[in-house]
Image: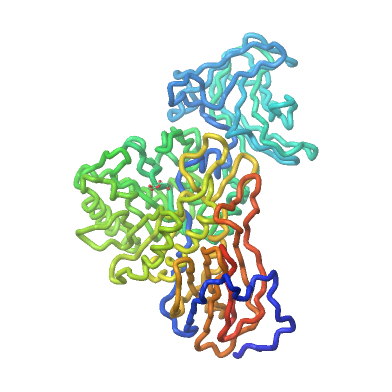
Amino acid sequence: MRLNLRKPLVSIAALGLALTATAQSRPPVTLDIHVNQVKAQASPMLHGLMTEEINYSYDGGLYGELVRNREFHPNDSWLTAIEGWKSVNHGGAESSFVEDKTTGPSQAISYSAKVTVESASASARAGLANEGYWGIPVRPSTTYKGSFYAKASGESGPIHVALVNDNTGVEAAHADVPALTSDWKQYHFTLTTNGAVRPSSLYRLEVTAARPGTFWFSMVSLFPPTYNNRPHGSRIDLMEKMAALHPTFLRFPGGNYLEGNTIKERFQWKQTIGPDVDRPTHMGPWGYRSSDGMGLLEFLDWCEDLHMQPLLAVYAGYSLHGEHVDPGPDLEPYVNNALDEIEYVTGDTSTKWGAERAKDGHPKPFDLKYVEIGNEDWFDKSGSYDGRYAQFYKTIKAKYPDLQLIATAPIKSMKPDVLDEHFYKSADEFYADVHHYDKTDRNGPKIFVGEWATMEGNPTPDFGAALGDAAWMTGMERNSDIVIMSSYAPMFVNVSPGAMQWHPDLIGYNAMESYGSPSYYAQVMFGKYHGDEIPQTDELGSNSRFFYSVTRDSKNSEMYIKLVNAGSAPQPVDIKLDGATGVAPIANVVTLSAKTEAATNSIDHPKNIIPVESRFERASGNFTYTLPPYSIQVLRVRTK
Ligand code: AHR
């Protein structure tokens, strides 16, 4: 079918985006796009997500739990305080609390907070307060679901639970839980705010008694509404931000978080499933303890909610401080553990671990295609990775021949299915390396760029970083016959003071709000306008600040011409659509641009730089298009 190429009624481009070449423009470059010559299929899984517990990504981030250190874990540092908790003594009440290592609600949580109330009354309550993760976000007309485990050594009377404003002491919501018994028991409550409450994170959760006595508390938990209403689920704004990236897979649980600093501190998936009270928690490699509320099944639920493939990384016998397990009999328990993990993900309910997953609430097996063996094993100087990968490969393939097994370092003894390569570079380094995969041997393993980022901007990438990232993405996209998957890292940062261990990070947030960095929006554009074919495109007269990638969506015959101008002058581009029998004159344009490379988004200015849509009305089989300075654009041109 020919397109109806009517003369446009209006021939000016909206928003002035189609600049005409000026004296300051760079010399034009030419893109000769052979519309019907498909060079390769674009990988449908090119754009994905990578995640780990870093920068308070889950606790104090995606995982909806609002209570910090809900289990009252003894402090991991030399400080004696129990992190997150304080005594509350209203109106002259007297109480104190200590860690009690002799009693707890479960084998995994075998300790608790022992609260001794010397004096208290209905008008002078005493107990505990939790500060949350840099505050507890309170919003109007909202219901919070909470619970705790507790016991008492005598009469406790009802326990009062409330969201209390730090400045005014006024309760935004409260509930009374019936008197405690002498045995550990879980109590549930809901807190509902009214419409007049002003949104604020200057709140704490108080748990108080109105009479003297001795009480023990553990696993004090409070959740706001979650994405898809999942019990103990994820923060809605962050899930929506990820959804807008159109991710096709989630690489989890790390990263360094998979490996741990030591073998003992590795991610032990069996300790992250089942009821929260049965999860012992563990020390992560980024300097803080993980509640493990975000456990194996929660990662999988996350994949299900955002329609992503899980890309499961299994611990492979190397930890960050250099401990390793030799291939052979010593490694066998780790390989078997990975087999159990794969069965937990994929097994039906007749299998041991599939039945366990069903018991945990998800009878339906998950679809799994990719398993990664370890993380960044090039750091292992013992040279054991070849043997470790081979042992995992042989055992896993024997049971799951269809799984694709990703190596994290080159393997000398065999060709891995897929090789994970990581790139943390400056924008200039990415510009210089943008043809990296143009030269890659097509007979080698497929490539997964499992971590990459332009290392500019703090806490989140600035526009210069977005330009570096966009340039790098054009290179991956042009070569997505070989680069089959990619994921930026790290994805999340809690921007509250002291929460960050690594920058830049794609998406920033505090207890109340979140924002996407310029780099995030560049990825939204690439994820949304991905296409399924890569037409042969020849570039003539390029320069060191211009980058491109062209894909086509065969279903709607739309060309996605992605152009990056990392320079400070306009960049004319002569675009030839060879072989097109018709070209719609009106192209839709999506633009991300800024005045400077230092320009950025932040928690206070979240939308400084966001994509803007406009129309270019002079598209044809052969037209000149001028990119504004410092810009990332997608031109959507319809051809036949
Ligand atoms: O993305 C941050 C860290 O960088 C990852 O945990 C690790 O794999 C890499 O070194």
Report if residue 76 is visible in the image: yes
Q: Residue 184 appears at what percent x and percent y?
A: 54, 24
Residue 414 lies left or right of residue 99; in this view the side is left
Q: Which residue corresponds to the image point at 48% horizontal and 71% vertical from the top-left?
A: 549
Residue 53 % position (x, y): 46, 42
Q: Nearer the viewer, residue 309 or 427?
A: 427
Left or right side of 601 for 301: left
Residue 45 in which image quadrant: bottom left
Number of marks in the rendered image: 0
The colour scheme used here is rainbow
Which residue is located at x 75 percent, y 26 percent? 170
Residue 187: x percent and y percent?
Answer: 61, 29
Q: Identify which residue, 319 or 184, lies in the foreground.
A: 319
Q: Point out the image quarter for the C terminus.
A: bottom right
Q: Residue at x 66, y 22 (%)?
A: 159
**342 is higher (above) or lower (below) than 45:** above
Whether residue 347 is visible, yes or no, is no
Report the front residue among 439 and 204.
Answer: 439
Vertical placement of residue 78 versus 458, above or below: above
Residue at x 48%, y 23% (from the top left corner): 104
Residue that extends furthest to the right in the rendered view of this protein: 196
Question: Relative to 242, is 434 on the left or the right?
Answer: left
- The correct choice, above or below, for 173 with respect to 57 in the image is above
Q: Quadrant of the N terminus?
A: bottom right
Q: Residue furthest front?
A: 23
Give the image location of residue 596, x and y in percent. Answer: 58, 56
Looking at the picture, does residue 24 appear above or below residue 352?
Answer: below
